[in-house]
Image: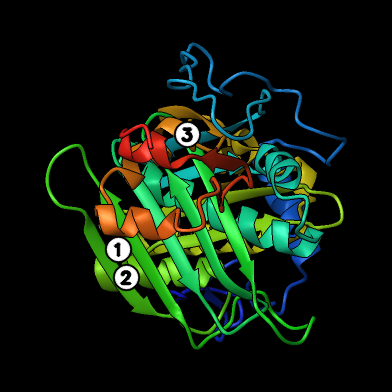
């Protein structure tokens, strides 16, 4: 998905908005970004944002949902997802800080190299921003199967504030893009009632943000721009989704495109959710819509595994325990190994 520039734009006519990077117009990014900073009163970057909490005065801080004590039981840092509406009521946006996701992924997947962890963080961040459109009232699972270095990447986000993910490495060359066409994007939404909705789409050219943009355009008829980033050298990461509303004027769209392009020169460590909202809003005054804290934690447990095995036929269970020894089952999300005995599944004491 790409937004064509309004005809009145003074930037390069070939420039478009799509994914995490934007073609450079004639004017330098740094000069334009500096002008944008001064216009919203941000000044030059001097370090991390000192604004704490939710970033919106008087806006209550929501607590995470029920804690699970399966895999990855140590305390995990939480990722903040903030949704807001621009002061002019023309742009809906969501922003998050992905550094806590990076910290948790690195601890939970020590077998993955830094670049693979960054790829997984980008899918997790994209999934959370996509889920924020429904106010986190449903479970959202996103699967990417690709011809790149990542054979499969999965993100699984629950409405109680838990998210987990996994990445399977492809066999073959150790260079190239992590996600690359041909492949498949699968999005499954599961509400409290009713059958899950599953959307499938062939991969398009581009990284993970381009896949989510294409899904929104083709499956939900929504035009949005998604940017996610994670530096494998430092772990600094974040995400921003912007959705112009139907009545957004041409001039406001032009300024939005300029803001998104100007973001390219802002250091990753400065792009916290509050900064991103001010940047798109071009100053203070955005209306907060919701605030969510998300924790990276696996939901696996021996009880849940036994419940799943209990739905197998007796013949299948006997096949699993044919050698007489306990079976070891490893969770693909967190790596925890559970030892399962035959009598625990069949309950016959033999």
Question: Badge 1: how crowded within 10 Å, few (<14), some, or many (20+)?
Answer: some
Q: Is residue 218 visible?
A: yes
Callout 2 secondary element: helix
Q: Which mark is residue 161?
A: none
The answer to the question of whether label 1 and label 2 lie on touching residues, with beta carbons closer than 8 A, is yes
Q: Which residue is denoted by mark 3 in the rendering?
A: 302
Q: Splitting the image into 4 quarters, where does residue 46 fall?
A: top right
**Cα distance in 3D space between marks 3 and 2:** 40 Å
Q: Which residue is denoted by mark 1 in the rendering?
A: 222
Query: Above or below — where is 37 with respect to 111?
Result: above
* Along the viewing direction, whichever of 102 and 310 lies nearer the viewer: 310
Residue 169: x %, y % from top left:
66, 71
Q: Is residue 90 visible?
A: no
The disc, 1 or 2, on the residue closer to the chain's N-terminal end is 2
Q: Residue at x 42, y 78 (%)?
A: 184
Residue 21: x %, y % from top left:
64, 70
Residue 204: x %, y % from top left:
46, 83
Looking at this rendering, what residue extends furthest in the front direction?
350
The disc, 3 or 2, on the residue closer to the chain's N-terminal end is 2
Q: Which residue is denoted by mark 2 in the rendering?
A: 217
* Along the viewing direction, whichever of 125 and 330 lies nearer the viewer: 330
Callout 1 secondary element: loop
Q: Nearer the viewer, mark 3 or mark 1?
A: 3
Question: Badge 3: how crowded within 10 Å, few (<14), some, or many (20+)?
Answer: some
Question: In screen coordinates, is 41 left or right of 318?
Answer: right
The answer to the question of whether label 3 and label 2 lie on touching residues, with beta carbons closer than 8 A, is no
**Cα distance in 3D space between marks 3 and 1:** 41 Å
Question: Badge 2: how crowded within 10 Å, few (<14), some, or many (20+)?
Answer: some
Q: Splitting the image into 4 quarters, where does residue 41 fall?
A: top right
Query: Above or below — where is 319 with respect to 340?
Result: below
Q: Residue at x 75, y 46 (%)?
A: 106
Question: In screen coordinates, is 169 left or right of 316?
Answer: right
């Amino acid at each position: 998905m790409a937004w064509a520039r309004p005809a009145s734009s003074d930037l390069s006519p070939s420039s478009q908005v799509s994914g995490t990077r934007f073609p450079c117009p004639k004017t330098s990014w740094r000069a334009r970004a500096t002008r944008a900073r001064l216009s919203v009163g941000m000044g030059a970057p001097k370090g991390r944002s000192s604004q704490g909490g939710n970033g919106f005065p008087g806006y209550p801080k929501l607590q995470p949902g029920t804690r699970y004590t399966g895999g990855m039981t140590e305390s995990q840092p939480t990722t903040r997802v903030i949704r807001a509406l621009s002061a002019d009521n023309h742009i809906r946006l969501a922003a998050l800080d992905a550094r806590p996701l990076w910290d948790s992924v690195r601890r939970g997947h020590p077998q993955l190299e830094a670049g693979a962890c960054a790829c997984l963080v980008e899918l997790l961040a994209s999934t959370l921003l996509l889920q924020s459109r429904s106010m986190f009232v449903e479970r959202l699972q996103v699967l990417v199967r690709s011809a790149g270095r990542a054979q499969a990447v999965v993100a699984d986000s629950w409405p109680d504030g838990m998210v987990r993910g996994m990445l399977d490495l492809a066999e073959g060359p150790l260079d190239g893009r992590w996600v690359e066409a041909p492949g498949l994007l699968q999005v499954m939404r599961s509400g409290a009632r009713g059958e899950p909705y599953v959307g499938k789409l062939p991969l398009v050219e581009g990284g993970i943000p381009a896949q989510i943009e294409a899904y929104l355009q083709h499956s939900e008829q929504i035009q949005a721009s998604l940017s996610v980033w994670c530096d494998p050298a430092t772990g600094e990461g974040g995400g921003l989704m912007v959705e112009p509303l139907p009545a957004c004027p041409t001039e406001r769209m032009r300024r939005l495109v300029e803001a998104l392009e100007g973001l390219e020169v802002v250091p990753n460590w400065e792009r916290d959710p509050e900064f991103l909202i001010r940047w798109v809003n071009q100053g203070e005054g955005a209306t907060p819509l919701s605030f969510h804290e998300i924790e990276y934690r696996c939901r696996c447990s021996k009880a849940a595994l036994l419940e799943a095995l209990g739905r197998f036929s007796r013949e299948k269970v006997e096949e699993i325990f044919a050698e007489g020894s306990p079976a070891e089952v490893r969770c693909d999300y967190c790596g925890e190994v559970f030892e399962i005995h035959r009598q625990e599944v069949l309950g016959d004491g033999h």
